[in-house]
Image (cartoon, rainbow, N blue to C red):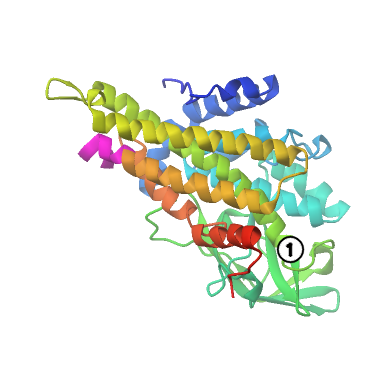
Amino acid sequence: MVQFSGVDYFNTESLLSAEERLVRDTVRDFVSDEVIPIIEKHYREGTFPSHLVKKMGELGFLGPTLPAKYGCAELNNVAYGLIMQELERGDSSIRSFASVQSGLVMYPIYTFGSDKQKDYWLPRLAKGEAIGCFGLTEPDYGSNPGGMITRAEKKGNKYVLNGAKMWITNGTIADVAVVWAKLDGEIKGFLVEKGTPGFTAPEMKGKHSLRASVTSELVFQDCETPEENILPKSGGLKSPLMCLDQARYGIAWGAIGSAMACYNAALNYAKSRIQFDKPIAAFQITQEKLVFMLNEITKGQLLNLQLGRLKDQNKQKFTQVSLAKRNNVHFALEIARLARTILGANGILDEYPIMRHMANLESVYTYEGTHDIHTLIIGSDITGFQAFN
């Protein structure tokens, strides 16, 4: 496998620390050696490459910003972003797995959990010995999660959950689900373990996107979970939204990984594809497309890097995360579509990664907050007017 040299027109490499570059290169090599050779087969067959989970754990890709005492790498947020970028260069499904495990499972356990919950779950999740999922979205409540109908009721020393969640990454294979439900009208987080009576997680089939990712429903029918499994520090819609902010940050970086993969494939193809006695890279229209791709990748890289630095200083705003997610996914999808046109008919073949990335990005465009919802989040911030209602 030819190693990927990256896309870096503005020398953002010079803005990274030695540790950040080492982390990026480690993930880059992992993706080139372990992901790219097998991902098309998994995508075609609709299967998740689960054998990669423990390898990602061993390399420190899971929960990498959390403390070392839990077996985590204790990296900064820029390094975390670079991990997400390189994983998504392989496939959105791989980044989605790591993003959910890190930002939507380990983060809420660390932030809202008890010491006992943290000591038990975080080391196992960090090593990839356990898999988690995040249950917020419901069949009838996606962009409006506060309207959820899943309920928890206290009965003795247990909580009884009833309801359903949908579009849950990792759900069927998860050992533990971080589930959000209304308890006496307030949203609280609960840890529901695999095999709990009344809890099922059927896999959703028939996807044309994220085919190498496990997507599931979570169904709770008089599901009893011990009172010690409530996340004691959680409370209100703000808690799950804090988790989503972590995931959206990783998506902003990951989208640039997909964009780089498409740009790189299109550039190499354009240089070698001969038409009218010269490479199509010599034609103005092709060059215009390639320049557009590079232009947007470069802007996205600079956006991500500044956002990461702000996050490491605890100065980032959730609206800034929304802007980065919205911008980078939008342009990554545009880049994938343009790359496909450069490859012509060959662009639809799985010999090249473009059509797979394009289909994946159609999901990334709408999950963890749709493009339109992020528009309204930013619009509200800059105008002072709430447009959701």
Can I make out residue 211 in this image? no
Can I make out residue 326 in this image? yes
- Furthest toward the right, the residue is 115
Query: Any magenta on residue 302?
Result: no
Q: Is 223 above or below relative to 373?
A: below
Task: Name the residue beneath numbered marker 1.
Answer: 238
- Furthest toward the left, the residue is 276
Identity of the residue drawn at 26% across and 35% down = 343
Instruction: Please report the bounds of the magenta region as a residue range.
Output: 339-349
Q: Residue 120: where, in percent of width, then height?
A: 80, 49
Identity of the residue drawn at 58% across and 60% down = 379
Kind of residue at disc 1 = Lys
- Furthest toward the front, the residue is 383
Label count reads 1
Q: Residue 380: where, in percent of width, then height?
A: 62, 63
Identity of the residue drawn at 57% across and 46% down = 324
On the image, which quarter does residue 146 sit in?
A: bottom right
On the image, which quarter does residue 145 sit in?
A: bottom right
